Amino acid sequence: MGRTRAGLLAGAALAFAGQGLRGSTMQSVATAAGVAKATLYNHFRTKDELARALLAAELDRLTALATELPPAAALTALADEVAGHPVLRQLAHDEPAVLTGLLATTTEHWAELVARLAVALPADTAAAELVARWLLAVVLQPGDRPGRRAAAARLAQLLAAA
């Protein structure tokens, strides 16, 4: 990913975390990224396109994180990351309908997410799908850190036994 695109996505994350998706404008994203609005429009035509790109970049980041850790630690890290993600928390608090709309996915995108988790953990497809569903639940209802960690440890045990 290029430096400009990465900066634009970082600006989007700042704007969305502070003002939500609906409350943010392309101008507020450009300001947060420290660029002119025209620069933002050269890369992203709409705020929805920008939000999808930010989501894709975060999935890439989380997949890379999981790949570097043993399964139990990966599950804990993934749960902590999605539970504490500033954009997700902002949307869950102020714009739950927007959040559920972003989380809804096509069959093809779901299969891609499951396949990426299967490689990152490593796990079979059924186990990776269970992990994906659990992580979606954590996005919607993060619970407390000890509870997430206990659930991650138990899920890791189930994956190891499979």
Image (cartoon, rainbow, N blue to C red):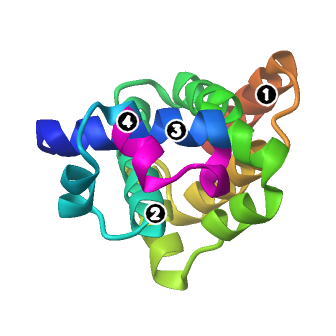
According to the picture, the residue beneath numbered tag 4 turns out to be: 31
Task: Give the residue type at disc 1.
Answer: Arg
- Mark 1 falls on what kind of element? helix
Q: Nearer the viewer, mark 2 or mark 1?
A: 2
- Residue contact at pointers 4 and 3, CB within 8 angstroms: yes
The range drawn in magenta is 20-31
- Please tell me how crowded label 3 is: few (under 14), some (14-19), or many (20+) other residues with Cα within 10 Å: many
Q: In the rendered structure, does residue 30 fall within the stretch colored magenta? A: yes
According to the picture, the residue beneath numbered tag 2 turns out to be: 47
- Please tell me how crowded label 4 is: few (under 14), some (14-19), or many (20+) other residues with Cα within 10 Å: some
Question: Quick one: which residue is furthest to the left in this view?
Answer: 2
N-terminal of the two: label 4 or label 2?
Answer: 4
The label number, if any, that marks residue 15 in the structure image: 3
Task: Give the residue type at disc 2.
Answer: Lys
Q: Nearer the viewer, mark 4 or mark 3?
A: 4
- Please tell me how crowded label 1 is: few (under 14), some (14-19), or many (20+) other residues with Cα within 10 Å: some
According to the picture, the residue beneath numbered tag 1 turns out to be: 148
Q: Nearer the viewer, mark 3 or mark 1?
A: 3
Give the Cα distance between marks 4 and 2: 14 Å
